[in-house]
Image: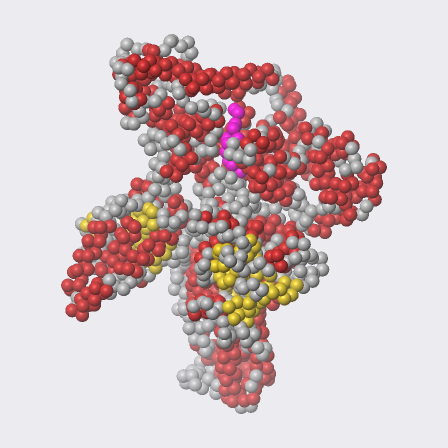
């Protein structure tokens, strides 16, 4: 008998509810009530012979003399609940009947349990199945009779679990349960308290809370179980692979799937020490179906788990467990003919297969000799047969979907459909990465899974729309021409040759054996390469002939395959094998660059909902590995195109909502009731097709399609007109066709975005690129040269370049009549320039597909995710630099020795200068002896060139004392190869990057470096530090629009650098002229750079060589003073120039000559700017030849790639800052901005700097972000792959106590000495603590609110934070040192509104430096930060630890976090942060008597004033304002009063 005291509250309430009894009260009351009802049932019922241990439900308790509760009391309690008097005999009679029926219902449940157990036993014959089905039918019939007698409505067996869940939750509408109950309150008063391990609890959670596999589990409930750490505390520590129930395994899989969906690491728990490991659990997962019947929902859960597992091969335990399941042993299930064919392709595989067979033979012999030991054949073992079992289950599931029975309502069959979709997703994932593809591909092809999937009934049904897309994606990867074992892609020429060779062999076979196919055999290969021709020829064969051809001669399928008797299937197998397929390059070239209406309105391709927990998408994934270079580009092309489509769709929907299209009943035309800033109507006939060029050779689409659109701007305001006039060349516009099917109203606007577009009447969408903007005067709006035409009227003409691929599809679709589309376009829409660069990226990908691979060979395998990731590290590269010029990296010799711990530093010379530079020579690996204890470094200190003689002046010296880890990063960055530098917050990533650039310039002065960042602000920050390094300014170039924000006195843009070079030329020629005059030579020698070069050779260099000859043979100490040839030129310097001491005088003479030599050398660099006559050619030369360091954003690199390739732009090194925030493809494009010379790329080193523990790239569509992993940067992917990285390990931004909030996430992150001095020693004036979590309860009965979807606000936190800001300003804190950040955009706008109303115009407050979201504040910092967490019901996206690290690492001196303590304290993922954050009380502790700047030390404690809530904080501010006003001058008081009156 089950002990009642061990039952959970949920189980108790369920049993009481099932008996019609009250379910309110605490657990003790429920136990007492349930004990009474069991006693009554036991006393009123006949004795049962069934043992208690066999009952699944709670069995009635045995009669006991010690029981005190009477049946009358129970009856009274029950009758009160039923609304009848206890003395009513009818009520008592009915109660007895209910008790009897309830008891019989327990017997029915026991019978059902026995049937379920019987299903788990191995089957002995078909009779057993018949008996089991008959028994189950009897149980169902008795159960239905009982329910009818109890007066309950008839229920469907499939609805039983829904009823249980409804009773358990106390709600009559299970479908609205998750929506009506607030987050975190499901199972309120009924959710089990997970205090100890109990197997019954697992059954309760799975059966009553999560649907028991018969209803889709509520994601909110799974999330609650996962939040309670039930997996970590109980499920895994108590997991026993031999004894654990199926529900135990399924519940673990559900939680793992939820963790993966939330982007959490689910595999760390499996690594914890215990009785079992991940291998044993995975074996239970694979064998789960062999010991228990699984519903389609449970099968789908298992498939999702397998998908996540095979996508996590970067985890060592997962990889070691899973890869044996996709190894060579899978081929034991291949047909004999296919096995021999596969083995014949690779001699190494033949060797491994023979070894495997010998090993199996030895095992079989050993088992035979042992006494009765069983050894299963290889092909029947679960690790070999698991995939075949899944395939069989998938094929059988199609037969179990009865579409006619449901009459179009697919709710009942949706679990089966979802299972089929998940299976397609699973096999796509297996085929899309090389480790799992190698042996799986042949198994899938041998069983013709692709053909069977296409011929399944679901493929042709309306419910199978997503399934069809998944099958198409499966077909792409199944037929991808790729060597599964070497990982080498095939060129198009080889693919064509292999195809035609296979076709010729097929023709010879047909000619020999089938006279009916002589026409096919004698045809040319090109005439039978499409489906229709092949089908027409092969249809001549009979069914038997097809069977013989496919199964015996071609051996494409087993003769005993159930599908082999279907002639249609056999014909499809042959046609699919021999038809010609398109190459990846052709696929991309045929795809339109701009989104059209078909893609915009397809929710399966671009979902507008944020949750994808219930289904999958027919989209590629960006995980760890890619099959080939073209596969890499194609996946990124599709996803980037769809992500931009999502953004465009949202903007189109917003435009149509604002314009309000409607149908005019009088004219029958579409009119607009409103207007939009970003769109204008196109009058009828205003769009004219101007030019359609003929296709290029080998293409079907036109080479170019040009149209003109006339617009009238007279109805717009001046500001909006100016925005339209600012449209420039290469901008992308969209033209919309809003038709007569407008049915929109306000209710439709609350639906998905695609439905909004449909109801607003959107028919067509076409994109175009601006060629020029003409005014009425027909003058071009050429913004390249900076000129904007002065419009005489409001008419404008846009010359647009349409997408040729889309135009070609339109012509084919409408039979050559393109006016059906382009004549209907009646709205033109523009976008913000910063958000409209997607076309450039897509064009880059298309060009890369057509031009071939341009990345270096040493980086190729790493980009695709293969090979040993250590081979690309700088230490493993064959050509290493032995000597590195560190310049001013080291402050002194002690600093140099500290920077190379464990190495012996040997100085080769002495240098007595105040601040020497250092060149360090590293030994080669071949020079290192095995018996050497330490590695020797040879250091050459030297005096930097004396810049006193240079006209540019003395550069700033490096004042940063780099740590040893930073020096290691600098060394690795200068060496050739791939270098990853992980920079936690405040560790000096930008300073390290700038120093790498300086060392690289001085070590390799002839090489050119490309600098890339994600944002203009980060690029300006890096470039500003770089401009202060010892790199001549003429070699620095900053490209892009953000150059205007660069805080320097020098213009580093292309035009600015050209002008600087021309001005410098004039300055140098003037100096040359003065030198010529001093030497008595004609001043005409300084007229041009060419004349100056002759002057150098004839008059300057000859005089110096003569002087050197005299100095080398003479010992006169006055020789330099007497014979130095350029004394007259340096006459303006302090005299005398020489002191009569030969050594010192000769040193000065060398310095003077160095100045003259460098002057002529710099003038020679100006010579090209003298010869080139226009600004365009000069700027191109500056870019391609002259500049040594070129900096731009990743967006600018994509926009200008075609120009860079055309100009022959070259570079040797690539340094990428913020690389963890850049999309995968936007990281790849800067590596391919130059042509490969003879197939060899010039790129020698790639340095990626970032922090994968902070926020990833921004992907607005959450489906692409979570499902497709599009937000995974290349930097993060390389870290996951195990590429060696260097992590900077000392931060100098925040106080050490603030750094503890996030330092736990980084390995050995310490603090620089500067964080223990100066302002870091002082306490924050007015606050008792340097950081504090402030609990904010409901403010006026309200916590978080959501005025519109995902627009979260919290008025209590907003009021509190603004009051604290006012408090800080009253104490004297500068507004520029205070930043307010929040986790949601809605809260940011709310805080800005309050600040605008109360602070901006107030003389005592003003506005803070920033009010921004956490995401927008990444990369920035401030002294004091006020953080609002907003949420009060669910944690929200701050649960992503990367976002929390960004939020907590922005402050240097003070951080004050406002949120709901009870909510965030319970989070497992956030606990390392909040354990430290909650070390102080959660009431804001103030010291109002202090003022800024303060002098109190941190160790000094003050008795704080504790603030209760936002209202109390407002009182504090009011009192301080009043005190401030009283102490102010009369003038200030009057100003304050006037401001108050105005408000």
Whether residue 1351 appears in this view of the structure is: yes
Q: Quadrant of the N terminus?
A: top left
Quadrant of residue 1141 within the rendered picture: bottom left
**Magenta stretch encompasses residue 294:** yes
Q: Quadrant of the C terminus?
A: bottom left
* Residue shown at the point (72%, 40%) measured from the top left: 575
Quadrant of residue 1365 within the rendered picture: bottom left
Quadrant of residue 1315 within the rendered picture: bottom left
Q: Main secondary structure of the magenta part?
A: helix
* Residue shown at the point (43%, 55%) measured from the top left: 964
Task: Give the vertical position of 897 relative to 29 (above or below).
Answer: below
Residue 954 point in image, percent of width and height: 42, 73
**Magenta stretch encompasses residue 1441:** no
The foreground one among 941 and 12 is 12
Judged left or right of residue 43, residue 584 is right
Q: How many marks?
A: 0
Residue 500 point in image, percent of width and height: 76, 46
Q: Which residues are magenta?
A: 292-307
């Amino acid at each position: 008998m089950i002990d009642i005291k061990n039952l959970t509250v949920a189980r108790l309430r369920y049993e009481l509810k099932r008996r019609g009894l009250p379910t309110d009260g605490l657990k003790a009351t429920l136990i007492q009530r349930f004990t009474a009802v069991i006693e009554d049932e036991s006393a009123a019922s006949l004795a049962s012979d069934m043992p208690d241990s066999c009952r699944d439900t709670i069995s009635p308790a045995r009669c006991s003399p010690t029981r005190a509760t009477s049946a009358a009391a129970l009856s009274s309690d029950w009758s009160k609940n039923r609304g009848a008097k206890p003395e009513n005999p009818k009520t008592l009679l009915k109660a007895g009947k209910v008790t009897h029926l309830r008891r019989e219902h327990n017997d029915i449940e026991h019978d059902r349990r026995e049937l379920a157990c019987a299903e788990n036993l191995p089957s002995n014959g078909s009779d057993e199945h018949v008996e089991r089905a008959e028994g189950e039918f009897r149980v169902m019939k008795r159960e239905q009779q009982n329910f009818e007698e109890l007066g309950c409505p008839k229920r469907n067996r499939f609805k039983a679990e829904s009823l249980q869940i409804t009773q358990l939750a106390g709600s009559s509408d299970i479908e609205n349960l998750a929506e009506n109950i607030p987050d975190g309150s499901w199972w309120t008063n009924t959710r089990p308290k997970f205090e100890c391990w109990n197997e019954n609890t697992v059954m309760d959670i799975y059966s009553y809370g999560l649907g028991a596999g018969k209803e889709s589990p509520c994601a909110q409930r799974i999330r609650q179980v996962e939040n309670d750490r039930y997996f970590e505390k109980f499920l895994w520590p108590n997991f026993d692979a031999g004894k654990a129930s199926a529900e135990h395994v399924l519940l673990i899989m559900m939680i793992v799937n939820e963790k993966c969906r939330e982007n959490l690491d689910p595999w760390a728990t499996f690594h914890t020490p215990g009785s079992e490991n991940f291998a044993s659990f995975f074996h239970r997962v694979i064998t789960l179906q062999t010991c228990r019947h699984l519903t389609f929902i449970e099968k789908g859960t298992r498939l999702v788990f397998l998908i996540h597992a095979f996508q996590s091969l970067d985890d060592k335990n997962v990889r070691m467990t899973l890869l044996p399941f996709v190894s060579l042993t899978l081929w034991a299930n291949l047909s004999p003919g296919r096995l021999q064919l596969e083995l014949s392709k690779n001699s190494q595989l033949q060797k491994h297969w023979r070894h495997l067979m010998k090993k199996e033979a030895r095992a079989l012999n050993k088992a035979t000799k042992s006494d009765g030991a069983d050894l299963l054949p290889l092909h029947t073992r679960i690790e070999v047969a698991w995939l075949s079992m899944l395939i069989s289950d998938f094929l059988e599931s199609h037969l179990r979907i009865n579409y006619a029975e449901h009459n179009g309502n697919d709710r009942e069959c949706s679990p089966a459909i979802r299972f089929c979709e998940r299976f397609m997703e699973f096999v796509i994932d297996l085929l899309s990465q090389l480790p799992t593809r190698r042996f799986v591909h042949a198994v899938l092809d041998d069983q013709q899974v692709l053909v069977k999937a296409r011929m399944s009934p679901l493929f042709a049904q309306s419910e199978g729309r997503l399934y069809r897309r998944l099958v198409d994606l499966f077909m792409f990867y199944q037929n991808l021409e790729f060597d599964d074992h070497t990982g080498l892609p095939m060129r198009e020429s080889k693919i064509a040759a292999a195809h035609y060779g296979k076709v010729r062999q097929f023709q010879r076979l047909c000619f020999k054996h089938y006279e009916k196919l002589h026409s096919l055999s004698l045809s040319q290969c090109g005439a039978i390469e499409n489906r229709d021709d092949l089908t027409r020829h092969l249809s001549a064969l009979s069914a038997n002939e097809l069977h013989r051809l496919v199964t015996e001669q071609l051996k494409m399928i087993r003769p005993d395959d159930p599908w082999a008797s279907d002639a249609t299937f056999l014909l499809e197998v042959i046609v699919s094998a021999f038809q010609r397929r398109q190459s990846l390059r052709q696929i991309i070239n045929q795809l339109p660059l701009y989104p059209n209406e078909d893609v915009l309105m397809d929710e399966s391709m671009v979902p507008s909902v944020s949750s994808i927990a219930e289904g999958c998408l027919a989209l590629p994934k960006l995980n760890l590995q890619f099959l080939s270079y073209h596969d890499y580009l194609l996946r990124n092309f599709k996803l980037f195109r769809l992500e931009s489509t999502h953004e465009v769709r949202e903007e189109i929907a917003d435009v149509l909502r604002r314009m309000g299209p409607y149908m005019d009943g009088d004219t029958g035309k579409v009119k607009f009731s409103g207007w939009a800033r970003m769109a204008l109507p196109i009058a009828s006939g205003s769009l004219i097709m101007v030019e359609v060029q003929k296709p290029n050779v080998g293409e079907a689409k036109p080479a170019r399609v040009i149209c003109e659109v006339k617009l009238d701007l007279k109805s717009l305001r001046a500001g909006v007109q100016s925005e339209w006039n600012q449209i420039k060349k290469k901008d992308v516009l969209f033209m919309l066709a809003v038709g007569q099917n407008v049915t929109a109203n306000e209710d439709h606007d609350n639906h998905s975005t695609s439905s909004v577009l449909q109801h607003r009447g959107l028919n067509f969408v076409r994109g175009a690129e601006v060629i020029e903007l003409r005014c009425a005067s027909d003058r071009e709006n050429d913004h390249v040269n900076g000129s904007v035409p002065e419009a005489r009227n409001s008419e404008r003409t846009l010359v647009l370049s349409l997408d040729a691929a889309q135009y070609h599809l339109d012509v084919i679709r409408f039979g050559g009549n393109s006016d059906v589309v382009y004549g209907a376009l009646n709205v033109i829409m523009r976008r913000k320039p910063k958000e409209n660069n997607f076309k450039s990226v897509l064009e880059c990908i298309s060009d890369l597909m057509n031009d071939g691979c341009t990345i270096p060979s040493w980086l190729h395998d790493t980009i695709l995710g293969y090979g040993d990731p250590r081979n690309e590290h700088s230490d493993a590269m064959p050509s290493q630099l032995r000597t590195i010029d560190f310049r001013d990296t080291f402050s002194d010799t002690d600093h140099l020795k500290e920077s190379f711990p464990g190495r012996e530093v040997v100085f080769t010379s002495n240098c007595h200068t105040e601040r020497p530079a250092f060149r360090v020579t590293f030994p080669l690996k071949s020079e290192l002896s095995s018996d050497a204890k330490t590695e020797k470094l040879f250091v050459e200190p030297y005096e930097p060139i004396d810049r006193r003689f240079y006209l540019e002046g003395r550069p700033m010296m490096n004042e940063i004392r780099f740590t040893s880890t930073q020096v290691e990063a600098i060394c690795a960055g200068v060496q050739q190869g791939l270098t990853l530098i992980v920079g936690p917050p405040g560790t000096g990533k930008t300073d390290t990057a700038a120093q790498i650039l300086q060392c690289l310039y001085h070590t390799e002065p002839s090489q050119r470096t490309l600098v890339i960042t994600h944002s203009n602000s980060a690029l300006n920050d890096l470039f500003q530090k770089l401009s202060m390094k010892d790199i001549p300014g003429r070699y620095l170039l900053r490209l892009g629009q953000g150059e205007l924000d660069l805080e320097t006195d020098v213009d580093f843009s292309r035009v600015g650098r050209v002008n600087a070079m021309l001005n410098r030329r004039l300055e140098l020629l003037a100096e040359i002229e003065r030198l010529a005059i001093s030497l008595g030579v004609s001043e005409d020698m300084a007229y041009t750079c060419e004349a100056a070069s002759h002057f150098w050779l004839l008059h300057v260099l000859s005089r110096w060589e003569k002087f050197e000859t005299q100095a080398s043979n003479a010992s006169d100490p006055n020789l330099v003073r007497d014979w130095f040839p350029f004394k007259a030129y340096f006459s303006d310097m302090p005299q005398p120039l020489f002191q009569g001491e030969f050594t010192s005088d000769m040193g000065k003479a060398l310095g003077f000559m160095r100045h003259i030599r460098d002057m002529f050398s710099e003038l020679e660099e100006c010579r090209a700017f003298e010869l080139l006559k226009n600004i365009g050619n000069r700027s191109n030369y500056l870019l391609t030849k002259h500049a040594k360091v070129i900096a731009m954003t990743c967006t600018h690199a994509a926009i200008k790639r075609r120009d860079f390739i055309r100009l022959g732009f070259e570079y040797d090194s690539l340094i990428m800052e913020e690389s963890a925030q850049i999309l995968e493809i936007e990281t790849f494009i800067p590596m391919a901005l130059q042509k490969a010379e003879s197939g060899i790329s010039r790129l020698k080193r790639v340095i990626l700097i970032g922090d994968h523990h902070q926020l990833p790239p921004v992907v607005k569509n959450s489906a692409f972000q979570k499902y497709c992993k599009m937000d995974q940067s290349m930097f993060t992917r390389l870290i996951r792959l195990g590429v060696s990285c260097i992590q900077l390990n000392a931060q100098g931004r925040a106080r050490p106590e603030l750094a503890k909030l996030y330092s736990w996430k980084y390995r050995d992150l310490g603090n620089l000495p500067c964080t223990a001095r100066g302002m870091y020693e002082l306490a924050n004036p007015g606050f008792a603590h340097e950081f504090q979590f402030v609990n904010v309860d409901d403010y006026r009965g309200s916590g978080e609110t959501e005025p519109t979807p995902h627009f979260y606000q919290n008025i209590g936190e907003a009021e509190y934070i603004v009051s604290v800001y006012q408090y800080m300003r009253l104490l004297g804190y500068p507004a520029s040192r205070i930043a307010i950040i929040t986790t949601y955009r809605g809260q940011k706008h709310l805080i800005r509104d309050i600040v605008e109303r109360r602070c901006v115009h107030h003389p005592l407050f003003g506005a803070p430096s920033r009010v921004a979201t956490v995401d927008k504040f990444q990369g920035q910092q401030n002294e004091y930060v006020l953080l609002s967490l907003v949420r009060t019901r669910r944690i929200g996206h701050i649960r992503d630890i990367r976002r929390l690290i960004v939020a907590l690492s922005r402050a240097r001196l003070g951080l004050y976090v406002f949120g709901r303590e009870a909510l965030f304290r319970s989070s497992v993922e956030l606990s390392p942060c909040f354990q430290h954050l909650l070390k102080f009380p959660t009431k804001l502790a103030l010291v109002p008597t202090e003022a800024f700047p303060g002098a109190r030390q941190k160790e000094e404690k003050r008795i704080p004033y504790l603030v209760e809530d936002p209202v109390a904080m407002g009182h504090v501010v009011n009192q301080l304002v009043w005190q401030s006003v009283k102490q102010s001058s009369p003038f200030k008081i009057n100003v304050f009063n006037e401001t108050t009156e105005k408000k």
